[in-house]
Image: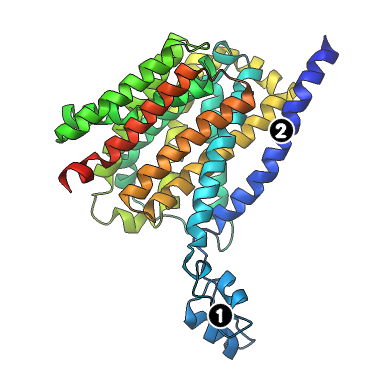
Amino acid sequence: QSCAATATARPQVQVSSRMSMRFVALALLATTAHGASAPALRLRGGATTKSSAVVAESGLTPASRCLSTRGGGVPSGVMSKVDVPLLSYFAFWYLGNYYYNIANKQCLKAAGGAAGFPMTIGVLQLGVGVLYALYMWAAPDSRSVPSVTKDDLVKMLPVGFCAMGAHCFSVFALSAGAVSFGQIVKAAEPAFAAVVSTAVYGKSISTAKWLALIPVIGGVVLASVKELDFAWSALIAACTANLFAAFKANENKKLMETPGLKDRIGSVGNQFALTTILSFLFGLPLLLAREGHKWSEFVSLFRSNSVISTNLFTSGLYFYLYNELATLTIKKTNAVTQSVANTAKRVIVIVGVALVLGESLAPIKLLGCAIGIGGVLLYSLIDKIVYG
């Protein structure tokens, strides 16, 4: 039996090793995200070389400089218009999300699924993000420490709590059912956002948007009808995660209206780091209350099963980095691009992860997925289509 278990675990460890190598590239991109423009080359004494000064003033990207070495100019074709950093953000955002879902599911499955340690794994994933955030502040020439006040941190508490709830309930949903099913339900987040925004925060939503929610909800229902891995606990947990995410979005918008807060935080990376730290602190008491009595059992599993230890670490890093990259990507694009990008991401994750993990992709499920995600895209664009 032990030999069989070892043989079963070996492919998962190999997958995790390959994923760890891809993570290194993702981490390097994140740490250099705000350093895309390199300074001119300086000589001893502070002087700037003539050639480097000319290149620096020209504003050319490194790729463009390489292309311009022969012939004396940058090509006027496609390459000169490509936003390489933005494309990199998109690529690593998608890859991070994709590999997070695989590593997360492998870790949850090896730890016993929904009956194992979903809350522990969810909170410790946030803890991995905290370690990364602290490293980024401690590393030289990496990221400046935010100068937030005690009052600023108090105002950030609702956002941190909601972020913790959204993440931990998502992890529980993915432990109780198929990843593809959980992602389909999570795609219905706009429906929860619409209800919360109008009922709690007094915001108005157009009739067109309300009508666009019909295919979103219908698609989720259709995908659930023939779901082989359907579980009420997965459905309820995913819906609860959507509810927390809706509150988080509204609270974050209120928070960023605080005068001078953006300047004190300093960057998008700092904002996400602070939110992650608060989320982790909120999650610790819940971990102890729900699964604290099984902590020694989890520690034993963590030490003896490399599938759990490796995937817990990598999934925590993937989660932190893909969320930070998603924020950077959204900041550099318009509303239409954001909507299309989010829709494409859902499709890639749902289909790709289902194929890798061997989850069911019945025609009725794919149809429901297409209708639901198409409804999300329509919801995002409908006001521009109808009202101009």
Kindly identify which residue carries mark 2: 15
Kindly identify which residue carries mark 1: 40
Image quarter where the N terminus lies is top right
Tally of marks: 2
Report the front residue among 188 and 282.
188
Badge 2 crowding class, 10 Å Cα cut-off, few under 14, some 14 to 19, many 20 or more, is some
Q: Is residue 64 above or below residue 367?
A: below
Q: Position of residue 143 (x, y in %)?
A: 50, 58
Q: Position of residue 385 (x, y in %)?
A: 22, 44
For numbered disc 1, what is the local secondary structure? loop
Q: Going by the image, does 363 lie left or right of 331? A: right
**Residue 311's quadrant in the figure?**
top right
What amino acid type is highlighted by mark number 2?
A: Val
What amino acid type is highlighted by mark number 1?
A: Ala
Mark with earlier residue (1, 2): 2
Residue at the (32%, 20%) spot, across then down: 218
